[in-house]
Image (cartoon, helix red, strand yellow):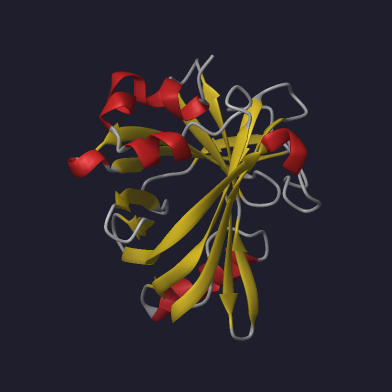
Amino acid sequence: MTSIFQRALGTDFGRLHPQIRRRFSVGLDSGEACVGRGTMDRVWHGRGFVKPFLTLGGTRNILVPRAGQDVPFTIENVPYLDSYGRETVTFVRTFAFPDGDRRFDATMIYSPARRCVVDYLGTHQHLASDLHFAAGPGGSLVIRSGEHRFREGPVDARVPGLVAGDATVRESYDDATERFRIEVSVANRRFGPLFGYTGCFTADFVDAGGLGIRDGLRPVREEARV
């Protein structure tokens, strides 16, 4: 057995920095969860017209409708079996702004049918995105989003590229500071940059069985469709 991320990376997994490999080995097989704590040097969003869309998404913990510098940050990667029996890993990011916390929630599974990780966004998993993983320079990890789909009741629709946000994530490990560095950018093909953040964090690896899933970490609604 391997983690959902190992399955997505294939032979590229061995090219990752050892600390990145450990972080993306979290899963039911490893028995580990990972909690990262650090500071985002910058949290940004695009031009003014994107703010209403970010605010709307923020009601379901999709993206973050706030900008700032030196923002305390926590990321919780905890494996569990969802209600459909699929191995799932949380990617719950909390940004501690002066006026209150903002969360950006995701839960990830590996889909053999799609041959990639599927990223369910938000508290109700209304949005599903294909994620494509690859090893980058210096043992870093590069994640790029692919097709996006919207699911609500009987609705099952592909999100057109004209309105979709394409995400790129770059995560690396700095041996000198013993910290993980992360850079996230979400952009629209027509309207340009929408949202992103960059910063660094340390990680604690904990027993997944002992930690369990704390209240509020799982999505309110789980979607069977990938």
Above or below, 184 relative to 18: below
Q: Residue furthest left?
A: 137
Identify the image quadrant of the N terminus. top right
Which one is nearer the viewer's eye here, 150 or 37?
37
Which one is nearer the viewer's eye here, 127 or 162?
127
Which one is nearer the viewer's eye here, 211 or 177?
177
Residue 68 visible somewhere in the drawing: no
State left or right for residue 58 relative to residue 177.
right
Q: Quadrant of residue 45?
A: bottom left
Q: Position of residue 32 (x, y in %)?
A: 60, 35
Look at 70% across and 32% down and name the residue there.
80
Q: Quadrant of residue 18?
A: top left
Look at 81% across and 52% down and name the residue there.
215
Look at 78% across and 47% down and name the residue there.
220
Q: Position of residue 58 (x, y in %)?
A: 61, 66
Residue 215 visible somewhere in the drawing: yes
Q: Position of residue 178 (x, y in %)?
A: 36, 56
Q: Position of residue 142 (x, y in %)?
A: 30, 42
Identify the image quadrant of the C terminus. top right
Above or below, 195 relative to 213: below
State left or right for residue 136 relative to residue 157.
left
Q: Residue furthest bottom?
A: 98
State left or right for residue 10 relative to residue 52.
left
Q: Residue furthest right?
A: 215
Above or below, 21 relative to 198: above
